[in-house]
Image: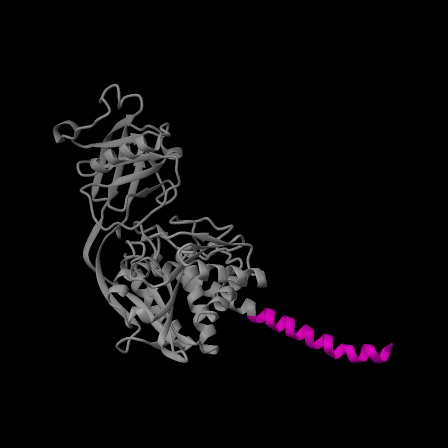
Amino acid sequence: MPENNSLLKPVFFFLFILVFSNADNVFAQKEYAKKILDTLCSEHFDGRGYVNKGDVRAADFLISELKNIGAKELGENSMEQPYIFNVNTFPYSIYFALEDDTLIPGADYILDPTSGTAGGEFEVMELNSENFYSVYGGKISFGKEDLEQKIIVFNFTDVTDKDKLKTLRGYANESMNYFPTVWVTRTKKTYSVGRSQKNYPLVELDSAAYNSPQKISLQINNKYESKYQSKNVIASIPGKKKNKFVVFTAHYDHLGRMGTDTYFPGANDNASGCAMLLSLAKYYTENPPEFTTVFCFFSGEEAGLVGSNYFVNHPYFKLNKVKFVMNIDIMGAADKGITVVNGSVHEAQFNRMVEINTAKNYIPEVKKRGAAANSDHHFFSEAGVPAFFIYSMGSVTNYHDIFDTAENTPLHKFDEVQSLIIDFVATIK
């Protein structure tokens, strides 16, 4: 039947072009997101933290990208919302050695973020399960006459009782007020941002690197900034209903540097969320939204949700005009799906998202979770604004460590999650 074949060829050709052009369009967003991820995680931005103004330079990059996309300013002729807060940093070279064995920061050890300054060679006073209770009676009193030029090592890796470990860690934290301290641990070493400073440093040391030395040498210098100036980045795309808002949020800050040679790239947490917001901004500039769509890139999240708290207390519009907030934090790989914090708080909206995903089979699971004060949605929720916090579930588990790199963050199901979000937002009335 040659006649029928000749008629079908153009149809098949059209379908071929349609399918592959759509595929190219889908994957172009992930490709764009990967470029954003690579850029934000580069050493140029110093881990987007509070050493070398890494956060501020990352904010400037986001502003430039938003302007290139076509997003608009929302407040006072600027996309910047400056504010100040206090933070403890480690901008100087750090050194830590057991006898003659110099250890690697980030891999062998991390600093407690409230660490102070100390330097020199110290005699080791080790506290462990054998001597702490029999010799010290399960308590420790600090006195300079007894512990001059000593470093206290808490080596309780054999203790499994969580309450006992919590008590022991409390002693270690108290020790920082008097002397350099080491906490030996078998658990994963995760860094964070400190808002206060102790007199001396505490080193969290991997038990695999500890060799019961007689001497420990170290040089650790902190810099406490009581008025560090950071900024949120706020942009918008005007909607058909200009005075009603849908708000997308993601924090762009991360942990920055721990010394001159170690930085935390923060790909999964949260360059991936920033990439999602920029990709969504591109979509909505090409597909004008129903409501004015706001993109909030917050700093200070790692320091205790400081940036989002500031914005909620100094909003650019009345919060009762916000239809919904979508906070995207940790979007490195959704090959197992996503979790929706506040899903059990806003059940009707959560069920709608599940229905969309079931119909279109975007991702394996949309999992419900209750309220949690664990990301930038929190202060919106506290102010009575309906909000979801969405994070991915999958093959990427790097978090607050030096391994959270762009290379280790494949953005599985990135396009599918974005499509699900777009479809969900389209149902908001």
Q: Position of residue 355 (x, y in %)?
A: 53, 61
Res. 76 image quadrant: bottom left
Left or right of 73 on screen, residue 39: right
Left or right of 238 on screen, residue 114: left
Number of callouts: 0
Along the line of sight, the residue nearer the viewer: 374 or 142: 374
State whether residue 327 is above or below residue 401. below
Queried whether the magenta region covers residue 325, the answer comes back as no
Queried whether the magenta region covers residue 9, the answer comes back as yes
Residue at position x 29%, y 64% in the image: 56
Along the line of sight, the residue nearer the viewer: 355 or 97: 355
Quadrant where the image shows the C terminus = bottom left
Left or right of 101 on screen, residue 119: left
Q: Position of residue 69 (x, y in %)?
A: 42, 75
Could you tell me what secondary structure mostly forms the magenta stretch? helix
Span highlighted in magenta in the image: 1-25
